[in-house]
């Protein structure tokens, strides 16, 4: 699994969890903010090739260059406790 595939899957899970919330205390403002955050993450992944000079593969999926893409690695850190997280994605090493 690539870091892009990993991030897209986690963001999709976040979106589903946000949609499924039906707590009385769950404010509309917080819900709206989280939806905006999800869309922002998706947009960052979409423009990552342009920001970091990533090349495209034949499938159209962004390919991380050999130095790695710092932005995607930083985004992935949030999910480092997920079983599909690849420790190679930690950049730079966390304390």
Image: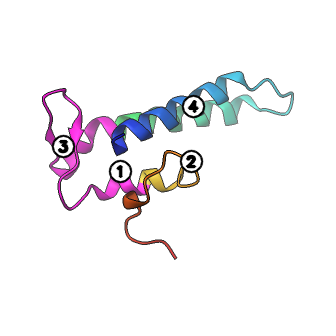
Q: CA distance from mark 3 to mark 4?
A: 26 Å
Q: CA distance from mark 1 to mark 2?
A: 16 Å
The residue pinned by badge 1 equals 72
Which badge, 2 or 3, comes first in the chain's sequence?
Answer: 3
Name above or below for residue 27 compared with residue 70: above
Q: Nearer the viewer, mark 4 or mark 2?
A: 2
Q: Nearer the viewer, mark 3 or mark 4?
A: 4
Residue neighbourhood size for the residue with mark 1, other residues' Cα within 10 Å, grouped as few (<14), some (14–19), many (≥20): many
Task: Estimate the x, y position of residue 41 in percent, counting from the top left.
Answer: 43, 39
Q: CA distance from mark 2 to mark 3?
A: 27 Å
Q: Which mark is residue 82?
A: 2
Q: Residue at x 53, y 55 (%)?
A: 80
The residue pinned by badge 4 equals 13
Task: Estimate the x, y position of residue 54 in percent, counting from the top left.
Answer: 17, 46
Q: Nearer the viewer, mark 3 or mark 1?
A: 1
Which badge, 3 or 4, comes first in the chain's sequence?
Answer: 4
Q: CA distance from mark 4 to mark 1?
A: 17 Å
Q: CA distance from mark 4 to mark 2?
A: 12 Å
Q: Which mark is residue 50?
A: 3
Which badge, 1 or 2, comes first in the chain's sequence?
Answer: 1
Task: Estimate the x, y position of residue 4 in percent, counting from the top left.
Answer: 34, 40
Which badge, 4 or 1, comes first in the chain's sequence?
Answer: 4
Segment colored magenta: 45-74
């Amino acid at each position: 699994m690539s870091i892009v595939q990993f991030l897209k899957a986690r963001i999709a899970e976040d979106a589903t969890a946000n949609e499924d919330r039906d707590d009385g205390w769950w404010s509309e403002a917080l819900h709206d903010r989280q939806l905006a955050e999800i869309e922002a993450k998706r947009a960052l992944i979409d423009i990552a090739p342009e920001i970091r000079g990533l090349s495209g593969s034949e499938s159209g999926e962004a390919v991380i260059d050999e130095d790695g893409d710092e932005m995607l690695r930083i985004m992935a850190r949030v999910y480092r406790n997920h079983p599909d997280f690849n420790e190679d994605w930690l950049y730079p090493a966390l304390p």
